[in-house]
Every structure is written in structure tokens, then in C-alpha cells.
Amino acid sequence: MDFKILVLIFVALSTAYNIALNIIRYRSANNPTPQSVSDVYDAETYQKWKEYSAEHCRFDIISGAVSGVISLILLATNVYSAFANLFPSDNIHLQLLAVIILEVTINTVLGSIFSYVKVMIIEEKYGFNRSSKKTFVFDQIRSLIVSLMLCVALAEAMTLLEISKWLVIAFGAIVFCGMLLISFIYPSLSRIGNKFPPLEDGELKERLLEMLSRHGYSVKAIEVMDASRRTTKLNAYIAGFGKTKSIVLYDNMLEKMSTDEICAIFAHEMGHGLHKDVLKGQFFNIGYITLISALVYIAVAVPEFYTQFGFESVNYGFAYLLVSAGLGVLQPLTSMAMNAHSRAAEYAADRQAVIEGYGKPMITAFKKLAKDNFANLSPSKINVVLEYSHPPIHSRVEAVEKAMAELAQSRENR
Ligand SMILES: [Zn+2]
């Protein structure tokens, strides 16, 4: 079997896929704005945003094609093995280091050029750029160092598979436990460097507590996080477990949303809690880690992957590149499944807000959020199915309206 051709086909396919997505996204700017969200932006602002995002899309299409072609040329001409063979062939650590340094340097240089155009030219032109040239250079150097360290660590860990390829299962288990641990300690981590004063007594606090007690939740405290220093995002979440649970509201939200709208967003978050969505998400994590483990196993178990690219034996730096090529093709499929599940969970959580009596403020909150995040009001269905973890804004508005009508109907029938 020709493994080299297989890898080249994988790289070509994922390049073509990403270009196609951008072309569809580019063309979606011409879609008419759905009636249900026509009042989100004024016409002039939206027109400016459309031009800005079209320019981004055009550039993503070009840069995607350029980096795809460069990857294909580097692979087809065995550049990686030619560079690695400059070093002693019996030292697997030097060999993998050579490939990783070449790989990461090429990626970072290309990435820096592309993001320079995006940030310093396109964003600057539309007045969105917030970083200076100095910060830009600093960020690029920092990302080069971080990715070098990360890739070397990963490739070095892969060399342990020399002992037994089945160790890949242990790796998968360690990664999964690490992810679980992070999701458990994240609420405590986010406390570092932020202030969490309690929410003042008043109508909002009473309503939130009442909503929670109706579902048998009791909480230790309702806190306001001073998130506005770092982000313009609006958010609310339930942190902690059992009797030590607390509710965290972003201060941005108290500023921009009405009491009814905050209750609606909170009811949505409570819906996620009632439906155990975080727990369900773990099954997808297990599936995803299994896929990566299988790819790693295949990448190190087939020596032809290396000999056909000019190496004498398995090179763990190149194995890292092979796994990314495999992921480039398989990830769209897994993320499509994950996103479909996530969108269904969002609709269900929105429905919870309707059930709690906050359908109308949920809709106005959506519109404020869409305006704040510069959301695309008319994305193409294909982009939504392939890459949206949340339904587009008009679908959410329409679903809430429908749920409100159904609920009113069923109350009438009773
Ligand atoms: Zn949600």
C-alpha cells in the first residue's frame, strides 16, 4: 500500500474542506436577513460588518490554499527526513527534535505572516485592532516557544510507545482524567485574580433563589464576578457541588441586561444543569480521545509511514505530523456529531427559560448578545451543520417563539 499517497490525500482533503467552508461562509453574506432578527443591527453597521467579514473570509481562502500547497510540497519532497538525516540516525531524541523544530518553525512563520495581515492590516482598516506592533511580535515569539515546548513534550511522550504500543490506552486515560480534573477545579481557578462580591439583596436575588428552590436546588451564595476587566462577554454559571454550590453572574450582565433578561439567561443555564449536559459532554470527550489514541497507535505501528517519506525508522516528531493529518480529515466528522448534540442541548436549555416564564426576555437577551458579539445573522445552513456549537440567532428566536405559543396553547386546553 502506498502510505505516502494516503497522507498526501489526507492533507489535500482537509485543505479543500477548509477552503470550501470559507467559500460558503463568504457567500452567506448575500443571504437575506431573516425577519425574526431584522432589528438587531442598524443597516449601516451591518453593512460595515459584512464587508469586514468578507475581507477576512477572502484572506482565509487564500492563506488556507497557500499553507495547504506548502504542506503538500514539503511532504512530497521528503524535506522532513532530509533535515532529520543531517543528525545521527541512532539518536531518536535528536531525530524527533529536528523534525519538530522544522515543523513548528514553518508553521509559526507562515501563521505570523497570515495573522499580521489579518490583525495589523484588515482589523486596522476597520478600526478593530487593539494590539500594537510590539505586542504583536511579542505574542508571536511567545507562541513559537510555547508550541515548540508542547510539541517536543508530546513527541517525547510518544517515544514511550517503544516499550509497548498498547500504552496508548494509558495515555488516553491520563488525558481524560486530566480533562475531568480541570473541569472540576476550573471554578476555583477562575477565582484567582478576580473579585466575587455577593449580589446585593433585592428583586433579582429573590427571583433567582425562588427559581432554584422550585427545582430543589439550594445554593451557598450568589456572587458577581468582575469579568468586565478582561472580557465583554456576558455569562452566568453554577459553580461547585452539592451544598457548596454558588451562582456566579458576570458584572457585564448586570450592567447591560434587564432583571427579566438576567433571569432568562440564568434559567437557560439552570436548564443545562437540570439536563445534566456537562456530564453528557464527557461521553463525547471519551469518543474523541479514543479516536486520537487510535490514530497515534496506527501512526507508530506502521513503519512504511516513515520509510516511504525517507526516514530509516519511526520518527516520533513526524508521527506527530501524521496524527495531525489524520485529525484534519476525521475531526470534521466528530465535531459535526458533537455540534449537533450541543445545538440540541441549547434549544432544550432555551426551552427551560420559556417554561420559567422568561420567553420574551430570552429573545431580547439573544438580540443584545448577537449585537455585542457581531453575530452573523444569516449563516449558511451548511456552515451551521458543520461547525456551529450553538444554533444561529434567528433559529433560537423562532424556536423560543414556537415554544411560547405551544405552552400558551396547552395552558388554554387545560
Ligand atoms: Zn447554553
Image (cartoon, rainbow, N blue to C red):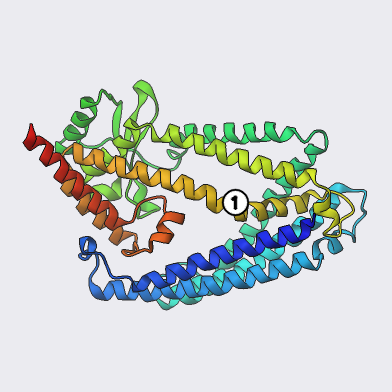
Q: Secondary structure at mark 1?
A: helix
At label 1, counting other C-alpha atoms closer than 10 Å, the crowd grade (few under 14, some 14-19, many 20 or more) is some
Residue 99, by quadrant, is bottom right
Quick one: 212 or 127, which is closer to the camera? Answer: 212
The spot of residue 257 in percent (x, y) is 22, 50
Residue 105, by quadrant, is bottom right
Amino acid carrying mark 1 in the image: Leu
Q: Which residue is mark 1?
A: 330
Identify the image quadrant of the C terminus: top left
Residue 84, by quadrant, is bottom right
Quick one: 48 or 193, which is closer to the camera? Answer: 48
Residue 40 placement, left or right of 179: left
The reply to whether residue 146 is visible in this rendering is: yes
Would you place residue 28 above or below residue 356 in this image?
A: below
Single out the residue that lies furthest toward the front. Answer: 1
Residue 369 placement, left or right of 72: left
Residue 170 placement, left or right of 281: right
Identify the image quadrant of the N terminus: bottom right
Would you place residue 71 above or below residue 151 in this image?
A: below
Task: Tell me what residue is drawn at x 22 percent, y 43 percent.
Answer: 264
Residue 241 placement, left or right of 146: left
Would you place residue 27 above or below residue 273 in this image?
A: below
The spot of residue 343 in percent (x, y) is 37, 47
Quick one: 318 or 128, which is closer to the camera? Answer: 318
The spot of residue 161 in percent (x, y) is 78, 38
